[in-house]
Amino acid sequence: MNLTTRNAAGDALTDLILTMFRANNLTVTWGDRLVAPFGLTSARWQVLGAIVFAERPQPVAWIARDLGANRQNVQRIVNDLHQEGIVVFEPNPHHRRAHLVVLTEQGRRAYDAAVNTYNPRADALAEGLSVEEIKTAQRVLATLRERLEGELDAEKQL
Amino acid sequence: MNLTTRNAAGDALTDLILTMFRANNLTVTWGDRLVAPFGLTSARWQVLGAIVFAERPQPVAWIARDLGANRQNVQRIVNDLHQEGIVVFEPNPHHRRAHLVVLTEQGRRAYDAAVNTYNPRADALAEGLSVEEIKTAQRVLATLRERLEGELDAEKQL
DNA sequence: AGCTAGTTGACATCATCATGTCAAGATGTG
DNA sequence: CACATCTTGACATGATGATGTCAACTAGCT
């Protein structure tokens, strides 16, 4: 008993979302195995990426915001990374509790090893696809992301 | 210390993957809230979808394969759905233990309610995007998915 | 019939993530 | 300084997912 229907764009978007679910899961699993030899996971790798690209050391909450992830989960991951000597906490001149997260030499080596393993695999995965269509895909998902962020933010207003 | 680099397609794919991570998470969260009023979640909704589209009743393991998900997790979800009267188990003439999963009237109502709530929202999310570019995005992610499935299958051979 | 291999559901464990709460600390306003 | 508000890390809980193991069951082969 369907009372509503979708237009062509809605149908196409539905296909895209279902494909995205599986592609996302596969990519995370694939990434987990790719960087496992360096003591990393997809989640840890993403956190390290945020630390590397931030230029200057940040507290955990900022990293979480950058990633669009939950503060609490990023905190746990960073604590694990600290336990294993991949990052260290440095004093924050602006906040007594919110320590700054900094990569250690070992952390830098793990991150570089992950990137160097990843790069040729990324090229291989993209083979046969044109840069234009990949960018189109990226743009569509970015639009989806923006709209969903807008909707979920709007909910919070309540 | 980077020894490897990526070509233009590899760079674009990397952007796409990072965007996909966030779009995927946002979509799941958005879907969870969308169907929560009907006692569903994104995961339950996907399982119900597999049951509905299968035409004929299937055992849990088949549903899991359809979804590309783990048998054990789908089992848990189906058991929960059974607990709440959304599905029932029927005897399987071909297998004494592998019962067939069938939607109840209540389950059908919940699924229809979810779809009817979703349809107009999908159209709205797709607004301003052309059907062609959405389909391009779907095709790119489908290619990514196929290649990752291939790589992960190849690993299993070891 | 008997054996082997694959399938299936049940059970268990661990990692990840969403969410809520709390206290310490920072910031802005008066 | 006093107060309210926001930020931040610590702690806890439940949902979801990946993974492994086991016993029941099926199917194929001899």
Image (cartoon, coloured by chain):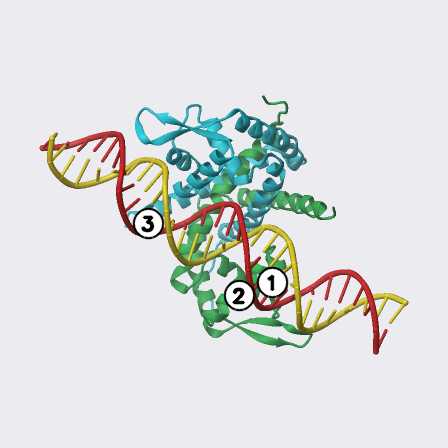
Chain colours: A cyan, B green, C red, D yellow
Q: Are marks 3 and 1 on the same chain?
A: no
From this view, report whether residue A148 is shown above or below residue A81: below
CB atoms of marks 3 and 1 within 8 Å: no
Tell me the tag on residue B78. Answer: 2
Q: Which of labels 3 and 1 is toward the front? A: 1
From this view, report whether residue B21 is shown above or below residue C4: above
Q: Is residue A73 left or right of residue C25?
A: right
Residue A66 image point, x, y percent: 42, 34
Q: Which residue is mark 1?
A: B63
Residue B148 image point, x, y percent: 65, 44
Residue B151 quadrant: top right
SS class of the residue under badge 3? helix
Mark 3 vs mark 1, CA separation in Å: 33 Å
Q: Which of labels 2 and 3 is toward the front? A: 2
Q: Give the residue type at disc 2.
A: Val
Which residue is painted at 53% across and 63% down in the image? B76
Which residue is painted at 49% across and 52% down in the image? A10
Mark 3, residues whose alpha carbon is within 10 Å: few (<14), some, or many (≥20)?
few
Which residue is painted at 57% across and 49% down in the image? A22
Q: Give the residue type at disc 3.
A: Glu
Mark 2, residues whose alpha carbon is within 10 Å: few (<14), some, or many (≥20)?
many
Mark 2 vs mark 3, CA separation in Å: 30 Å
Q: Is residue B110 left or right of residue D23?
A: left
Mark 2 vs mark 1, CA separation in Å: 10 Å
Q: Are marks 2 and 3 on the same chain?
A: no
Residue B30 image point, x, y percent: 42, 51
**Subunit that carries the residue with mark 1:** B
**Subunit that carries the residue with mark 3:** A
